[in-house]
Image (tube, helix red, strand yellow):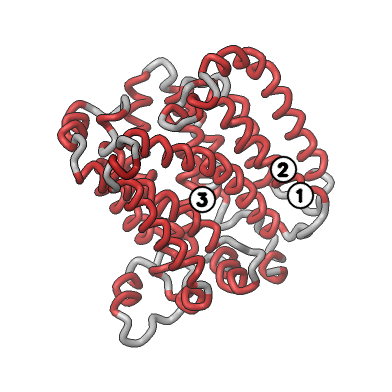
Amino acid sequence: MNQMAQRQNPWLRSGAWDVFWMLSGLWLLLPIAGFSGAPTALKVMLIGATALLWLSHRFATTYNAFCMPAYRQLLGEQRDRFVILPAVIIIATFAFVFSPESVMRLNLWGRVQILATIFFLYNSYHFGIQHYGVLSIYRIRAGQGHSGWLKRYEKFFAIAVGTIVVALAQMCHGAEVVADSLVYNVVPREVFSVVFGVLQKVAPLLVLGLAGIFYAGEFRNTPVSIPKVLYVGGLALQGILAYFLEPISFLILWGVQHWLVSVALGAHMADNDASEVPAGSWWYGMWARFNKGFWPTVFILVLASIVLTPFFELAVHPYKVGWAPGVLSTFGSMLGNSWATKLFIALNFISVYIHFVMDRAVFRFSDPAVRKISVPLLFKPVG
């Protein structure tokens, strides 16, 4: 890993590629500002981004693990992480959703709220830890040290801003991801309304102070990582704007940035997989055609997202106020309380829970076996 990190190029692939895919927290502010007076345009932008990227990002590391021959041996060695735990999630979620009300003593919406609460709490952490992961990628790329206070501080900053500060803002704004959960059953929404004014004043100062400490340490580094400097700037803006943007605008800034990073890393690693397809393996042979470049992998991930998003999103439409246009809303209401609704609710939560597990399994660099496979796929010289 140290040998790969010695490259002077600080970017993962190139400046333009990294700015679009990895540093989108900055450029996404331009369309948000441009459409600030046109809520319909923002809604269309969010619908389009959701169709293309929402499920794509969930599937990316699962695709890496199961469709790339580089991970074939690791799947056998770590079956508990890659096979058994996902199987437990699948069985437990289906059992929870499909059990009769007489057994569960919960209607379907009550079960959705419990599953959504697990999602909201872990997803908040998941966003923060992805921010730290990106900073770690650029730290390695720049050839900076792998220990020291700044590395530890980067993780603290990512969690403090990307998880805690943003999650509090979502609770105050009544974001859909919070409203679907049990958070307001535990802490009444009125409480967040009372503290919102205080947080609007305190959070920006806190975020700026925390970012200032990072920059004080980073600019003492040799070399300074420009991508890290830019990424922390984008994350700091995200933490501040969480308290001032309308929910739909912030969802674009917060969600799309996260989705782009996941899709980009998944396709980048597939592009770098030079492993031979096992002889006689129809499975790896089938996927090999998509692992021969960045864009073919993006295509297959996006295609899966386009096909499945209407079912995953609209299965729960009878239980919430969504943003889907009329024709899709009609489709969602037709599902009603049927087995199809339960099926897609279960698949929705299964996909995101397994996404959490696979992200951890594929990027668990503290494990030597994972590091041996994943690091070369990330840092293989491009071009």
Q: Residue under circle 1?
A: 152
Q: Residue at x 46, y 45 (%)?
A: 259
Task: State the image coordinates of residue 15 (x, y, percent, origin top left).
Answer: 57, 50
- Mark 2 residue type: Phe
On the rendered structure, is 124 left or right of 232? left
Please report contact status of discs 2 and 1: CB closer than 8 Å, yes or no.
yes
Task: State the image coordinates of residue 354 (x, y, percent, origin top left).
Answer: 44, 55
Please report contact status of discs 1 and 3: CB closer than 8 Å, yes or no.
no
Label 2, label 1: how far apart the Cα atoms are? 6 Å
64 vs 356: above or below? below
The answer to whether residue 274 shows anywhere in this view is: no
85 or 73: nearer the viewer: 85
Q: Residue under circle 3?
A: 17
Q: Residue at x 41, y 15 (%)?
A: 37
Q: Residues within 10 Å of mark 3 (few under 14, many from 20)?
A: few
Q: Residue under circle 2?
A: 156
Q: Residue at x 53, y 25 (%)?
A: 171
Q: Earlier in the sequence, mark 3 or mark 2?
A: 3
Q: Earlier in the sequence, mark 1 or mark 3?
A: 3
Label 3, label 2: how far apart the Cα atoms are? 27 Å
- Mark 3 residue type: Trp
Element carrying mark 2: helix
The answer to whether residue 381 shows anywhere in this view is: yes
Label 1, label 3: how far apart the Cα atoms are? 28 Å
Task: State the image coordinates of residue 197 (x, y, percent, origin top left).
Answer: 62, 12
Task: Give the quadrant of the N terminus.
Answer: bottom right
On the rendered structure, is 31 left or right of 233? left
Element carrying mark 3: helix
Q: Residue furthest front?
A: 102
